Each structure stands twice: as C-alpha cells, then as structure tokens.
Amino acid sequence: MALFLASLRFQWRLAPRSPGTLQVWATAPLFTAVFLSIAEHAHRTDLTSFSVVAPTLMGQWALALGIAGEIITDERGQGTLEAVIATPCRLSVVVVGRICAVSLLGITAMAEAWLVAGLGFGRWIAVPHPVVLAVALLANAAAMAGTASILSSLFVLMPSARIVQNTLNYPLYLLSGVLVPLSTLPAWLRPLGRLVFLSWSADLFRAALDGAAVSRPVARISVVALLGLSGYLVGALLLARVLRRVRRLGTLTHT
C-alpha cells in the first residue's frame, strides 16, 4: 500500500504539467459542445447526459492509456528503465498507482462538461443521486488503472507505445457504449461491450444523472470494480512474464 500511495502522489504532482493532461482539459469542453450540438439539432434533449458522460470517460481513458505507455517509454528514453525494474518494488503496483492518479484527475472533465452544458446550452444537469455518482466515479477510476495496466507489458516489448495508444481509443469508446447506447450496436457486438468496464460505468453515470431511482447500484458498481481488479491481475501476470522474457533475452532497452 505504501508503494501504491507513493506512486500515486508522485504522478499527482507531475500530471497537472503534463501535455496529456492539458490536452484532455482542453478537448473535453470541445467534445461536449460537439455532442450537445448534435443532440440539440436532432431535438434529442434526452441525450444531454450522454453529452456530459462521454467526454468524461473519453478523457479519463485517454489519460490512463497515455500514462500506461509513457511510464515505460519515458523511463526507457532516460535510460532508467533497467534501474526501476532492478528494484525490489513490484512494477505493476507502481504502474497502477500512477495510472490511478491521472484517472482521478480525469474526473475534472465531468465538471468541465457540466459547465459547458449549463453555460453554453442552458442545460443545467441536476445530480439527483450524488452518492451513487461519487462512488461510481471512484470505482471507474480504479477500473481504469487496472485495465490500462494490461497494456504496460505490451509497451515493454515495443519501442514506442504511441501506435497502440492511438489505435485503441475510439474503437473502445464505440464498443463500450460511451458514445452511443449499446442497444444501437449490432446484436452480436453487445455481449462484447458488456465485457468492457466502460459500458457499466457509462450506464451508472447516466443513471445517477437521471431522476429515476438507480436500479441495483451496489451490484453494478461491484461489476465495475471486479472488471478493474481482473484487469489488474491479468496485467500483473503479463508484466511479470514479459519482464522474465526480456531479462532472459537481454532486450529490455532495445526490443
């Protein structure tokens, strides 16, 4: 736990000055304005919550995926990756702690989206279930960190993480129902979407912003947490195997 908290604090100090964080803060209002404009033009004011939830999850995932690759890429570029891996600390815990920091910071994208909806479009969205929303945001941030850590092992093997980062964003948004409801996807894709924690998080966020009672909130938040935990366990296992491989082959720095 001490290692996790130290990693979280370290990344928390770095993140506000990171180009990736600044990019998310700059693009979240723009995405919100685009989605709200489409909803207004289609006379679908019922989709206002979608226009706030989507930029939030998109920003959080972009930050999580970005730092998952940058941790490895930056250490390799500075020539310190070998020293980090040689320490007795578990690299998987360091990775998750640092990703969790930016995932929590990404929650600010929801505040930006909420302000754009209210100030720019006169759509002040009420939060009738603040406790559910708060717990769902925390569970989602943890699941972000756990899931993104799976990719760290791939980034160890690759000279650059940028290609993977650019490839995985938007397909995942569509598959998980972040941009559009899962019900609009082909029937054969919907079960796959339910395997992605983002689909559960998106539904929870939208339900928390709806006036109706949230059905089975504890069970749904538990699913998000379990999917995130599963991601961390898979990521830790893969990272351990990859590190054993690169140590044996001597290809940690040059793959």
Image (tube, grey):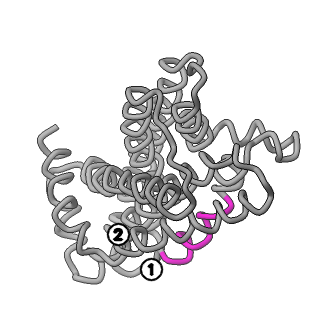
| Tag 1 near tag 2, CB within 8 Å | no
**Other residues around mark 1 within 10 Å, as few (<14) / some (14–19) / many (≥20):** some
Q: CA distance from mark 1 to mark 2?
A: 23 Å
- Does the magenta run of residues contain 165? yes
Q: In this view of the protein, can residue 156 be seen by the observer?
A: no
> Please, is residue 187 above or below residue 124 in the view?
above
Q: Is residue 39 left or right of residue 118?
A: right
Where is residue 40, by image quadrant? bottom right
Amino acid type for the residue under numbered disc 2: Thr
At x 56%, y 40%, the residue is 197
In the image, farthest residue toward the front: 122
* Range drawn in magenta: 162-171
Q: Which mark is residue 159?
A: 1
Q: Which residue is mark 2?
A: 21
Residue 241 screen position, x and y as percent: 42, 52
**169 lies left or right of 13:** right
Q: Quadrant of the C terminus?
A: bottom left
The residue at 58%/32% (across/down) is 210
Disc on the earlier residue, 1 or 2: 2
Residue 76 placement (x, y as % from top left)? 30, 77
Element marked by disc 2:
helix
Residue 92 is situated, as x and y percent measured from the top left of the image, at 31, 50
Q: Residue at x 35, y 74 (%)?
A: 22
Q: Amino acid type of disc 1? A: Pro
Q: Quadrant of residue 247?
A: bottom left
Rendering coords of residue 75 (x, y %)? 26, 74
Query: Of residues 126 and 172, which is closer to you in this image?
Result: 126
Residue at x 41%, y 39% (from the top left corner): 137
Residue 8 lies in the magenta-colored region = no
Position above or below: 70 against 199:
below
